[in-house]
Amino acid sequence: MSAVTVRDPSIFGEPDIRLGGLHIWIHTPPGPLKADGGYTWLRSTAHYTADGARVWTGGEIFTIECLASLRAGCSILHADFRAGMTAELPPIEPDLAIRMKVSDRVGHMELEVEMTPDPLRQSHLFRHELDQSYLPTFIDQLDRVIEMRPLVD
């Protein structure tokens, strides 16, 4: 949604969500979120760092519903780890998309993160190999974010 220029990520404190080179800080305060018939957006900052690259994006770049969908997909991966299975943060906005795909039966996964601070002029794709041991911590992080911001009617 908006270009983000950050030189020092420590200004945000510890990220709420961390996986591979991806760091996400949720700025929407804890507390009930009112569903207004549409999506419930979270104000966030996302950063990915890899060899030779650092990309930032921020604003209302995903929803609590999207995080819940990613969390549900990760729980399925953790319970039934089979090659080809995926979990994703659906890209409602072009700023951030996260996909996790099981690579094989011995515990390897590929993390793909697409992000951009400027959807009209840039796109960045990062790939990172992970193993299934990252899933429990990642699921716990998602649970914390979701539980701290319950949806209410």
Image (spheres, rainbow, N blue to C red):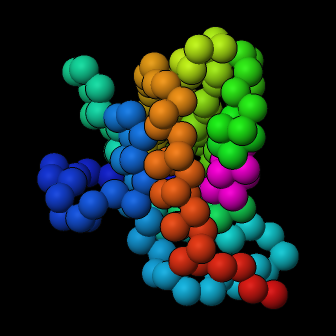
**Residue 4 placement, left or right of 2:** left
Q: Is residue 132 above or below residue 141?
A: above
Task: Residue lying at the far right in this picture: please name it.
Answer: 37
Can the viewer see residue 20? yes
Residue 77 on the magenta segment: no
Quadrant for residue 62, please give it: bottom right
**Residue 7 placement, left or right of 131:** left
Q: Please tell me which residue lies in front, 80 or 148.
A: 80
Split into 4 quadrants, where in the image is the C terminus? bottom right
Residue depicted at x 55% and y 86% = 31
Residue depicted at x 17% and y 58% = 10
Residue 23 on image: x %, y %: 37, 47
Q: Main secondary structure of the magenta part?
A: helix
Q: Please tell me which residue lies in front, 81 or 24.
A: 81
Residue depicted at x 42% and y 40% = 19
From which residue to which does the magenta span run? 67-73
